[in-house]
Image: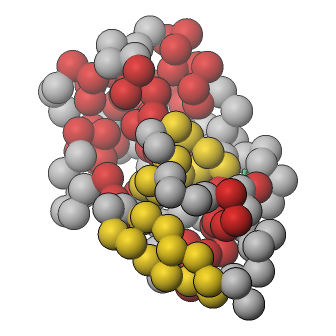
Amino acid sequence: MPEYTINVNGQQKKVEAVPDMPLLWVLRDLLGLTGSKYGCGIGACGACSVLIDGEEMRSCRFPISDVGAAKVTTIEGLSKDGSHPLQEAWIEHDVPQCGYCQTGNIMAAAGMLRSKPNPTDADIDEALGSHVCRCGTYTRMREAIKAAARGVK
Ligand code: FES
Ligand code: FES
C-alpha cells in the first residue's frame, strides 16, 4: 500500500493508504482525529470540512493522494485548548445543539474569516449556506461568527 506524508495541524504525519482513501478516513481512522464528522459522504452536508491551505474542503471527497504538500488543518488544530475566537464565541452564544454539524461550520467560518475578517450576513450565508444543520443553529452561528470577528465573545 502506498505511504503518504502529509502535514496535519503543523505536524508531518506518515500514513499508509490506498490512493483514493478519503482524507476524512485518514484523519479519523489512521490519525485518530475524530473531530471531523461523517455525514453524507458525497460532499453535500459539510460535516467533514477541514481547511486545506486555508480553504474549506470537504474531506469526505478529498483523496489522500491529492493532499501532497498542502497544509491540512482540522478542528483539533484551530487551537490547543479551545481558545480560538470562533470556539470561544460558539460557547458564549450557546451555538451547538446536538453538535454533529458544528465542526464543519466552525471550519468553514475559519476559512471565510481569513479572506473576510468583517463578514456581512451575505458573506456568512455564502460560506455556511451549504452546511446542513438539522438542529437549526444558523442564527446563533451567524451571531457567533460576528462576535468572533469583532474580537468579543
Ligand atoms: S460528510 Fe463530507 S460533505 Fe457530508
Ligand atoms: S447542531 Fe445538530 S445538526 Fe447542527
Q: Is residue 12 above or below residue 3?
A: above
The residue furthest right is 42
Question: Where does the C terminus fall, quadrant-wise?
Answer: top left
The reply, left or right, for residue 40 in relation to residue 54 is right
Q: Residue at x 50, y 57 (%)?
A: 69
> The N terminus appears in which quarter of the rendering?
bottom right
Position in image of residue 141 (x %, y %):
45, 33
143 relative position to 82: left or right: right
Residue 108 seen: no
At a point 62% along the width and 83% down the height, the residue shown is 3
| Residue 15 or residue 132, whichever sits in front | 15
- Ligand 1 sits in quadrant: bottom right
Name the one closer to the observer, 5 or 75: 5
- Residue 70 lies, in percent from the top left, at 50, 52
- Residue at 67% across, 67% down: 64
Residue 150 sits above or below residue 56 on the image: above
Q: Identify the image's colour scheme: rainbow, by chain, secondary structure or one colour.
A: secondary structure
Locate residue 9: give its quadrant.
bottom left
Residue 21 appears anywhere in the view: yes
In the image, 119 versus 132, the foreground residue is 119
Q: Residue at x 38, y 26 (%)?
A: 113
Question: Looking at the picture, does residue 85 appear above or below residue 148?
Answer: below
